[in-house]
Amino acid sequence: MRRSALRAFAAFMAAALLRPLQSLAGGWNKTAFDAKAVADALKGIGVATTENGDKIAFKAPEIAENGAIVPLEITCEIPGTRAIYILVDKNPQPLTAVFEFDNGAEAFVATRIKMAESSSVRVIAKAGGKFYATMRDVKVTIGGCGA
């Protein structure tokens, strides 16, 4: 009897603890992340058109010595920013990262991304139901020689 009660309690606790993790995984946009082309990734995100992202401050190196760790810093001054998307045009899967913000959160991201080769890096911000875009070219060198 005691073993049955312990098994039932263990099953209940496992289900209760795993449920929050399942809800976090529900937000995964598999279609957008698995896309092989920029246009398909943008379609997966829901981007039909973009507006000028002049209120997006985007810092990226002109030349990155190591494509495995390319530092980026993004600040979006557009009120009500809900998400920031980072896409690398020549990566095998262009959608590199998605950052979501709750109401009132400062839309700031400092991260490092991996780049397969020299490419354009796009930053898309979602605010007020619209998408805003800006882009920078980043050259990735291999051993000090241009790639």
Image: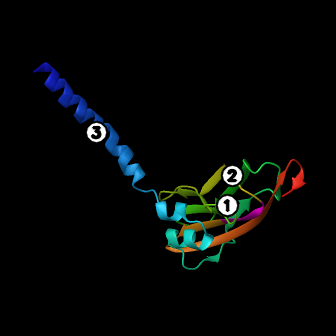
Question: In the rendered image of this protein, does residue 74 appear above or below residue 2?
Answer: below
Between disc 3 and disc 1, the foreground one is 1
Quarter occupied by residue 10: top left
Return the x and y of residue 115 as percentages of the image width and height: 71, 55
Q: Which residue is mark 3?
A: 16
Q: Which residue is mark 1?
A: 91
Q: In the depicted view, which residue is nearer to us: 88 or 56?
A: 88
In three-dimensional space, the C-alpha distance between marks 3 and 1, rounded to whole angstroms, equals 39 Å
Between disc 1 and disc 2, the foreground one is 1
The answer to whether marks 1 and 2 mark residues whose Cβ atoms lie closer than 8 Å is: yes
The answer to whether marks 3 and 2 mark residues whose Cβ atoms lie closer than 8 Å is: no
Quadrant placement of the C terminus: bottom right
In the image, which disc is placed on residue 104?
none
SS assignment at label 3: helix
Examine the structure image and report whether residue 119 is included in the region drawn in magenta.
Answer: yes
SS assignment at label 2: loop
